[in-house]
Amino acid sequence: MSEDRIIKLEHLSKKFQIKGTEVTAVDQVDLEVGRGEIFGIIGFSGAGKSTLVRCINLLERPTEGAVYFDDTDLMSVGQAELKKIRQKMGMIFQQFNLLEQRNVIDNVCYPLEIAGVKKAERLERARELLKIVDLSEKEKAYPSRLSGGQKQRVAIARALATNPEVLLCDEATSALDPITTKSILELLKKINQDYGVTIIVITHEMKVAERICDRIAVMSEGKVVECGAVKEIFLNPKSDTARRLILSDDQIDESGQGRKVLRIAFDGQSSFEPFISSMTVHTGIMINILGANTENIGGKAYGQMLIEAPKEEASLQKIKEFLTEKGIYFEEGGKSA
Amino acid sequence: MTQELWELLGKGILETLYMVLVSSAVAYVIGIPLGVLVFVTDTGGICRNRAVNFIFGGIINLVRSVPFLILLVAILPFTRLVVGTTIGSTATIVPLVAAAAPYVARMVESSLKEVDHGVVEAAQAMGSSNFQIIYKVLLPEAKPSLVVGATISLATILGYSAMAGFVGGGGLGAIATNYGYYRYDSETMLITVLLLVLIVQLFQEVGLRLVNHIDKRIK
Ligand SMILES: Nc1ncnc2c1ncn2[C@@H]1O[C@H](COP(=O)(O)OP(=O)(O)OP(=O)(O)O)[C@@H](O)[C@H]1O
Ligand SMILES: [Mg+2]
């Protein structure tokens, strides 16, 4: 396993001093990211995700702990070495951060320029990358003329220019609409599969993590409260944060009023619609759906649903039996089962 | 109006342009590095350095707070040392540069502040050195704003140069002073003032056109 990991964080902490008070943005985090995996860091706003990811390429210097890239202890290398290492770690941002006064191809050329690659070679590589992100025809366009999705594609091409081994994505899709988000996530997945780039995805959306991550770490108040395979956590969240992330906040409020709630997780066993109707038919009980966060992929349902459980024990039993029979995962009590 | 007067005004225009353009050029040669220096050493800058920032920021503020005419008089010995005289347009360039360089430095600094910090961060994440960030990111990204700043600086320096005319400088300011102030020839003074206004307008016009041309964010 150890030769398979590319990044390792050891007891990593980052504290900020703001006007005399100390804020612990990252608190004693231990993480290992395997080579070639898509690793998610998920948490609510202010959890410390950005700070954590910025510690990985030392944009933020940890106050405590160590960061290893391969076997190099980043805290111990000099500036020159650090620059070389940063060229092996691409990064993309929520706000794209393109150079506004450079056109698309010159943006992609930038990292090659500073890496000292010759002009002809730079252009060739940049064109190759624009092809990968499907933006060849926008070569001469300036960022202000591009849509958000196109800007992020340019940013991805730019981040990949120096053939990095790792790509850090800080809320890369948070400024994009759902359809564009989907296409960017597909692109990231493709890059991971075709080029073996390890990807670290920061997000506050469980949907994003579910779609592309192999493993995730759930963060809350600077700590990693849960870490594991995305499917595992999705189906069986152990931390309150993970639970709340899986269901969006408003859904939990709706269910929080002392009602008995069943949480049902779909993992592609059956499709959503027939499931509801057949449950109603089989049990003879009208189901009150409190909230759902599901998606149909190829006729299969993935996601979460909260239903109001019947008060009578017999009806509840019927529903549980039905779910068990269908092999669908469920859990009682929405907030803290 | 006489042929003689027109020749005088023509010479005045050329002198004014000479003083303003040369001193602006020198002021920028000093002001750009100075502005960059205070920007990057400031809190949140890419190479934060309290001491350097304090010293250079202090010098800028000090010179900026001295009224131009006083500055001009105060550095007369230095001017004589550099140019050999304290009268005429070439001699005026020295105090103009002294007053304009810190002004330009602040203009440059404020243009650099407009550059989105995220872009700088992205450049750092790609492994740029501080020097590369300055000349490949900060200055190019701030270019349109720098040009706007330059047109404002030019107008300010033009104003200084006219003031210098009062105490022996050349150019249109000297003509306005000699004719308007000492000889009560308000017509000639009015003409020189109009010419000064026209030159400012010209700078503005050229500057704004240039900005529209180079700024890739609009259009
Ligand atoms: N440069 C800084 N100076 C001071 N405090 C900071 C700084 N950066 C982050 N923090 C603080 O650290 C905590 C974590 O911030 P961080 O940006 O890492 O959270 P996040 O999980 O990325 O949130 P979001 O989803 O909103 O981006 C917050 O309380 C924030 O105020
Ligand atoms: Mg963040």
Image (cartoon, rainbow, N blue to C red):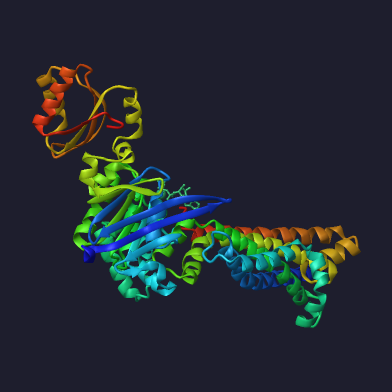
B10 left or right of A46 in image = right
Q: Nearer the viewer, residue B2 or B13?
A: B13
Q: Quadrant of residue A29?
A: bottom left
Q: Quadrant of residue A198?
A: bottom left
Q: Position of residue A259 (x, y in %)?
A: 29, 22
- Whether A141 is drawn above or below B97: the answer is above
B119 left or right of A252 in image = right
Quarter of the figure with the N terminus of chain B: bottom right
Residue at the location (18% across, 18% down)?
A: A313
Q: Nearer the viewer, residue A191 or B50?
A: B50
Residue at the location (75% across, 81% down)?
A: B82
- Whether B14 is drawn above or below A211: the answer is below
Q: Position of residue B89 (x, y in %)?
A: 76, 74
Q: Position of residue A92 (x, y in %)?
A: 36, 56
Residue at the location (23% across, 57% down)?
A: A37
**How many marks can you see?**
0
Q: Position of residue B92 (x, y in %)?
A: 77, 73
Whether residue A246 can be seen here: yes
Q: Nearer the viewer, residue A88 or A256?
A: A256
Q: Nearer the viewer, residue A4 or B26?
A: A4
Whether residue A142 can be seen here: no
